[in-house]
Image (tube, grey):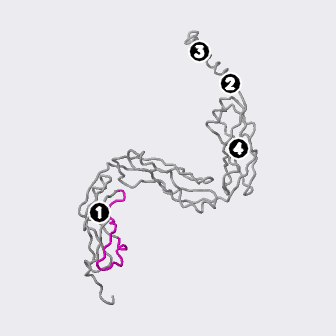
Amino acid sequence: MTPSPYSLLRNVRLKLAALGLSVFLWALVQTEPREAQNVDGVPVVVDVADTAWAIGGAPQPAQVELRLSGPTGEIIRLSRAGTVLRVPIARVGSRDTLVTLRRDWVELGEGSGLNVESVFPSAVTISFEPAMSRVVPIALRTAGSLPSGLALSSPIGLTPLVARVRGPAGRLELLDSVRLRALQLHDVTGSGVLEVAVDTTGLAGVNVSPAAATVGIRLEERVERVLSGIAVVAQAGYGRNALSVMPETVDIVLRGARTLLAVVEPVDVRAWVDPELLRDMAPGEERRVPVRVDGVSPLVSMDLSQELVVVRRSSSDVPPEGS
């Protein structure tokens, strides 16, 4: 269908303005000052396609200096954003390889008006080691505390539990796990699922898959409950009623998620003294020792009315002769 003269003239002012703006921007780009400038500190990144080998360490040198030419604004933007020189290694010929650097290995981005005139130094030495692959546990770390009024109602979930690592055999043989970046508990405001990246500190040249793990968190209101009159048990192989505890009972203040505290039965909570701390007591001897508590979820915090108690061995508890 042939467009009518009216449709061609519709919004003619807007069309002319758009054309004028395009011409202006084109002219601005063409007249932008161009110069040549050095950009230093550009990292050298090595990609090894040969599955039998892995990078044994950082290339030497690990950074290079570029001589760039092009629009001044482009050079400034690249200097601020940063770039890398990526070295592709299809096949490893020897443990130590001198690689001549190519200008087109510098990542400038699509549509960039920049040219790489030179790279200094012009070559780097790359060390390789035989590669290996193995599966290791993923270690979750936490930092800080949950916001006031919140508590974990179940252990933090982690998926997956293991990661596959590939890299230099000498380094991986000593690797017992990969750590996630520390989960900042003070930033967690409710139940949910989070993705936490692997902490790559000290893992240069090691490929970790997956690069992140899923962490599941269940939170509830943090409440307080007091258990009163919990008897302290002290036993160490002496005669019956040979040991006495002062005070005989303690009060335990529990703090944690409401559901965890609700299921605590006082008869299942045990306050006791480590028998090893009571060995070889003489008749009439007293010892001041700490109290331990069992029967409470590790997600629940506790405060004791008495963290230390005095245990006394009866002066009448004298072993028979020859025992």
Mark 1 lies on a secondary structure that is: loop
Instruction: Measure the alpha-carbon separation of dots 3 and 4.
Output: 46 Å
Q: Nearer the viewer, mark 3 or mark 4?
A: 4
Marks 2 and 4, how far apart in space? 27 Å
What is the distance, in whole Å, between disc 3 and disc 1 at their CAs?
Answer: 83 Å
* Mark 1, other Cα within 10 Å: few <14 / some 14–19 / many ≥20: some
Residue 176 quadrant? bottom right
Disc 2 or 3, which lies upstream in sequence? 3
Sequence-earlier tag: 2 or 4: 2
Q: In the figure, is residue 281 to the left or right of 26?
A: left
- From the image, tell me which residue sits under label 1: 306
Q: Which residues are magenta?
A: 274-299
> Which of pointers 3 and 4 lies earlier in the amino acid sequence?
3
Residue 17: assigned label = 3
Q: Amino acid at mark 2?
A: Glu
- Residue drawn at 71 percent across, 27 percent down: 34
